[in-house]
Image (tube, rainbow, N blue to C red):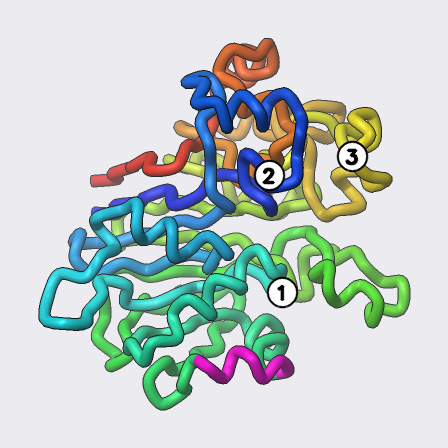
């Protein structure tokens, strides 16, 4: 069994974003049921409902724990059902929440050597005492068990695979102009979670659908996929910034190379958009864009959404 819990469905900044005066964000602040607020993207998975592994530690992690009973203490004066954290990249939106977990609580931190290298280079992450929070470098393209700090297996296993992406924003100045990742370096990865029978895919950041990625996802039972922008030029046309989705390392939902078209013919049973930017109108349940996505067989993730593969 794979029990998945969406802790956050929004992109960086969340929804509503703290400094956004856009209509959609104001609708969310006002409690409009068609504009549900969302934390920054993160997923929790479990095989038994007792031990949970968080995929990406969002800046909102403390609040995500407060809003999900499954992740709250159950035994003694201090405890947690969170057994580990698995990172899919080094962007601040996926690692800042690690600092929330600094109260000497045993858990396992897993990521590629490249991502762990980013953490190693920043001494602030040493607040996670390595004697209590072991760091496990995991290779690409190899299944490995999700284990707690003591090494006990959970019944779930994971596989990290490279996807096209971009170096983290805070690393761009040192990237010598080479920002894009072609899907081989391991800086941006997707993850498959399996229990020996069923598999879900979680890919919150992806710049393009490649033939290799399409082949991997073909016939999948469940894919939670990058839904950052509806249009590649969305940020520009809205006057929110100078970058396209491609420049930010994210595929758009629409367009000739967008996710809607890219998934056509792949036979994926259930497709769910995650990591959705506050500018994306698909967040609004009453928008024409939501209707288009639904007609194409896509769901839009919401915080607290539970998925059971059994």
Numbered disc 2: secondary structure: loop
> Which of pointers 1 and 2 indicates the residue nearer the eye?
2
Q: Residue 25 occupies which quadrant of the picture?
A: top right
The structure residue drawn at horizontal position 81% and vertical position 38%, both measured from the top left corner, is 241
Left or right, 293 with reference to 236: left
Query: Looking at the figure, which quarter contains the C terminus?
Result: top left
- Location of mark 3 (residue): 240
The structure residue drawn at horizontal position 76% and vertical position 28%, both measured from the top left corner, is 234
Which of the marked residues, 1 or 2, is nearer the chain's N terminus?
A: 2
- Location of mark 2 (residue): 17
Q: For the stretch drawn in magenta, what is the main secondary structure?
A: helix
Q: Position of residue 150 (x, y in %)?
A: 24, 81
* For residue 270, above or below residue 57: above
Report how far apart the C-alphas of labels 1 and 2 lie in the structure: 29 Å
* For residue 125, above or below residue 181: below
Residue 126: say if magenta.
yes
Disc 1 crowd rating (10 Å Cα; few below 14, some 14-19, many 20+) is many
């Amino acid at each position: 069994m794979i029990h998945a819990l969406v802790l956050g469905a929004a992109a960086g900044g969340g929804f509503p974003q703290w400094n956004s005066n856009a209509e959609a964000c104001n609708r969310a602040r006002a409690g409009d049921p068609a504009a549900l607020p969302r934390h920054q993207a993160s997923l929790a998975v479990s095989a038994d409902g007792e031990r949970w592994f968080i995929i990406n530690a969002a800046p909102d992690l403390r609040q995500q724990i407060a809003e999900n009973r499954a992740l709250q203490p159950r035994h003694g004066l201090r405890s947690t059902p969170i057994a580990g954290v698995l990172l899919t990249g080094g962007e601040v939106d996926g690692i800042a929440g690690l600092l929330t977990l600094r109260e000497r609580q045993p858990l396992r931190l897993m990521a590629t050597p490249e991502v762990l290298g980013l953490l190693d280079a920043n001494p602030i992450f040493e607040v996670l005492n390595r004697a209590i929070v072991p760091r496990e470098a995991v290779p690409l393209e190899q299944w490995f068990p999700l284990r707690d700090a003591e090494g006990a297996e959970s019944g779930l296993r994971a596989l990290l695979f490279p996807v096209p992406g971009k170096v983290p924003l805070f690393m761009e100045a040192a990237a010598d102009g080479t920002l894009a990742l072609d899907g081989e370096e391991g800086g941006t990865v997707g993850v498959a979670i399996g229990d020996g029978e069923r598999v879900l895919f979680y890919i919150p950041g992806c710049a393009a659908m490649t033939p290799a990625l399409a082949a991997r996802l073909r016939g999948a039972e469940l894919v939670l996929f990058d839904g950052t922008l509806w249009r590649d030029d969305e940020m520009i046309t809205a006057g929110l910034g100078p970058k396209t989705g491609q420049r930010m390392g994210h595929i758009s939902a629409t367009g000739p190379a967008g996710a809607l078209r890219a998934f056509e013919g792949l036979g994926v049973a259930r497709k769910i958009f995650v990591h959705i930017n506050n500018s994306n109108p698909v967040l609004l349940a009453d928008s024409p864009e939501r209707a288009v996505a639904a007609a194409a067989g896509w769901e839009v993730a919401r915080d607290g959404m539970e998925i059971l593969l059994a």
